[in-house]
Amino acid sequence: MRDFVTAVEASTSFAEAVVVEIESVWEALGRPERLDLVEGGSGVGTLALHCLAADSEAVRAVHWVMLEISQALRDTAIVRLDRAGLLIDERVSYVTDIRQIGAGNKVHLILANELLDNLAVRVIRRVTLDRFEELYVDPVRPDTEHWVALGGNDLHRASHHGRLVDVGTEFPLADRAVAWTWAALDRLSSGGRMILFDYGATTSELATRPERGWLRFYRGQRRVNIADTAEGGADITCDVPFDQLPGRPQLTTQAQWLEHRVASLRSPTSHGDRAIVDRSGMGAFTAASWTR
């Protein structure tokens, strides 16, 4: 069992909103016979399951690429989609890395829900106005921390993203999230869109959180403190520093993005619907959108 629940699993209204987005992209691209869609971090296939079952002309044009590194999750997704009769016309394929899709502008829509927060970050500390250090942990003695001064391009990037961070403050440097986003953008077709949903803020805002508050630890579908992870482990994620991502994405809250596409979410009645637009919870997550 996963240690946290995402909006995809919480309510089918999330998929309903995605179907509206699929229809919007399909119309904007001139109703192509085939619409290539990539879902990053597709998990057990819940979003694909609900979207591909929709009675929509645009959805019937979709070829859904499920990007998932876990073999176990991919196997579960295949079983679920097969039982729903959604694999008979080869509308679904699988990759384990965005780069397997190949370079070139060939994807019309890229979606990812709570993917970037799972990618490892570097922990950086601003020592002086022009000096930054990176945290290293001894795998033999994980309670021992070492700080190493940055130089070259690493220093340049830390200085740029940490320019508004106070001296003595720590912040995440999201190299892997940046690399993934660049790779995804490189595969978008002209007029294509990418929408990434996640929790996060700007680098300077994250840096104000004490005790590395931008790191999150989950166990048993609830958030726990780092002290609670000593025994039994936990799912570790990091708030996304959206200002570090490439391009100039349009940012809005998840609640606003969903309510704009599904009117019933403006006055939700079910527990799941309320959860995905809750301004004190998932509804406050960021929806970052790029159009090529």
Image (cartoon, rainbow, N blue to C red):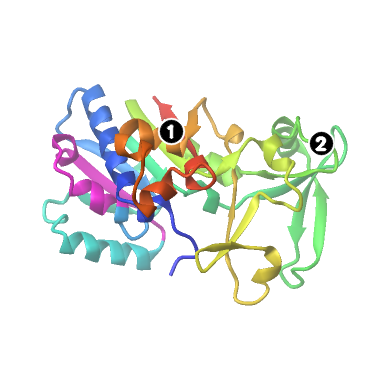
**Which of 221 and 203 lies nearest the eye of the viewer?**
221
Q: Is residue 82 visible to us here?
A: yes
Q: Neighbour class for label 1 at 10 Å: few (<14), some, many (≥20)?
A: some
- On the rendered image, what quadrant is the N terminus found in? bottom left
Q: Secondary structure at mark 1?
A: helix
Q: Neighbour class for label 2 at 10 Å: few (<14), some, many (≥20)?
A: some
Question: What residue is at 67 percent from the left and 70 percent from the top?
Answer: 228
Question: What residue is at 78 percent from the left and 39 percent from the top?
Answer: 151
Which residues fall within the magenta stretch?
47-69
The mark nearer the N terminus, 1 or 2, is 2
Residue 39: numbered disc: none
Q: Is residue 186 visible to us here?
A: no
CA distance for labels 1 and 2: 32 Å
Q: Nearer the viewer, mark 1 or mark 2?
A: 1
Q: Secondary structure at mark 2?
A: loop
Question: Whole-percent x and y of residue 140?
Answer: 74, 73
Question: Whole-percent x and y of residue 41?
Answer: 41, 52
Residue 166: numbered disc: 2
Q: Residue reaching furthest right?
A: 128
**Which of 179 and 256 lies nearest the eye of the viewer?**
256
Question: Disc 1 marks which residue?
Answer: 256
Q: Is residue 222 left or right of residue 38?
A: right
